[in-house]
Image (cartoon, rainbow, N blue to C red):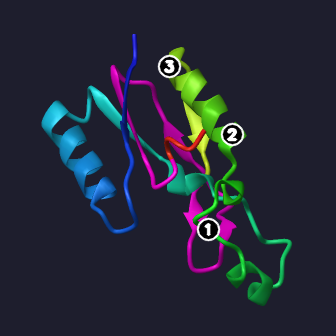
Amino acid sequence: MVQVIAISGASSSGKSTLAAALVSAIGDELAEILPLDAYYHDLAHLAPADREAINFDHPDALDLALFREHLVALKSGVAVQRPDYDFALHCRRPESVRVVPRPYLVVEGILVTSD
C-alpha cells in the first residue's frame, strides 16, 4: 500500500526542500516525489507574451486531471511518465520523467491541496 504525504505552502516556503529531505531520510528506494509543478499546462500554442500573462497561481494553470490520474496509478502500483516542465518557456519538454511506485509518495506544490 502506498502512503501519500502531501506538502503544501506558499511560494518559496521550502516545500521542495522539505520533500527532498523527507525522501532522503526515508530512503530513495522507499520514497518518490511527485511535484505538482511538473503538471502546468503546456502553453506552446500561445505566443510568448500571452504565456507570461497566465496566472500560474490559479488551479486552472495546472492539469489537475492528469496529476490525479498519475496519483491514482502510483497508488495502484503502476509507474507513470510525468511531464517535464520548462519554466522559462512555459512549455512541457518533449521528454517525460518515469516515476515508479514506492511505499511512500511525497506530493508537493503550492496548490497540491486545492482539489
Q: Do the CB atoms of the residues marked 2 and 1 lie less than 8 Å apart?
A: no
Residue depth check, mark 1 versus mark 3: number of the one nearer the observer: 1
Q: In the rendered image, which residue does mark 2 sit on?
A: 66
Which quadrant is the C terminus positioned in? Answer: top right
Mark 2 or mark 1: whose residue is earlier in sequence: 1
Depth order, front residue of 10/65: 10
Q: Which residue is mark 1?
A: 56
What amino acid is labelled 1 in the image? Phe
Kindly identify which residue carries mark 3: 75
Q: Residue furthest top?
A: 1
Q: Is 38 placed left or right of 66 in the picture?
A: left
Q: Secondary structure at mark 2?
A: helix
Q: CA distance from mark 2 to mark 1?
A: 17 Å
> Which image quadrant for residue 60?
bottom right
| Three-letter code for the amino acid on which mark 3 is drawn | Lys
Left or right of 55 on screen, residue 17: left
The residues colored magenta run: 84-111
Is residue 16 placed above or below 44 in the rendered structure?
above
- Find residue 20 and name its label: none
For the N terminus, which image quadrant?
Answer: top left
At label 2, the amino acid type is Leu
Using the numbered discs, state the Cα–Cα distance from disc 2 to disc 3 in whole angstroms. Answer: 14 Å
